[in-house]
Amino acid sequence: MQEEINVIDHLLAVEKNAAVLIDNAVKEADGRIIEARNKANSQFKEQYDDFALSLQKAYEQTVEEKKSEHNKKLEAYKRELENFPRDYQAFDRVLDGLLSEK
């Protein structure tokens, strides 16, 4: 009978050791998962920030190019208007006609 009790005690001790090993393994796995998640989040944020910065730079460059293009077109239009012949007599006749109708 004592031998059976000793075997049962031994099996309980083995089970307790196994439970401790499993608990330690779960803690280790949780720690590794947290570490891996933090590393992945950090890498994602770094890549996201780099990508966002490159998009911001491309946007700013495009805006500057469009402003420059707009200014060039506006200056060309102003030069075209300055070189357009003016007929002040015809303009005066149109104004006289419009003002005399009222």
Image: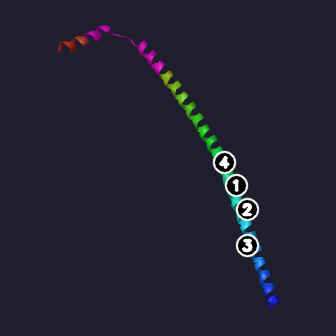
Q: Main secondary structure of the magenta part?
A: helix
Question: Along the horizontal axis of the image, is 4 left or right of 33?
Answer: right
Residue 35: mark? 1
Q: Which badge, 2 or 4, comes first in the chain's sequence?
A: 2
Residue that badge 2 annotates? 28
Residue that badge 3 annotates? 19
Amino acid type, mark 4:
Ser
Farthest-out residue, bottom: 1
Alpha carbons under labels 3 and 1: distance apart:
24 Å
Foreground mark, 2 or 4? 2
- 82 part of magenta stretch: yes
Point 44% across, 19% down: residue: 77
Residue that badge 4 annotates? 42
Task: Give the magenta range.
Answer: 74-94
Instruction: Pick the residue in front: 49 or 5.
Output: 5
Label 2 with label 4: CB-CB less than 8 Å: no
Crowding at mark 2 (Cα within 10 Å: few <14, some 14-19, many 20+) = few
Crowding at mark 4 (Cα within 10 Å: few <14, some 14-19, many 20+) = few
Q: Secondary structure at mark 3?
A: helix
Point 42% across, 13% down: residue: 82
Amino acid type, mark 1:
Glu
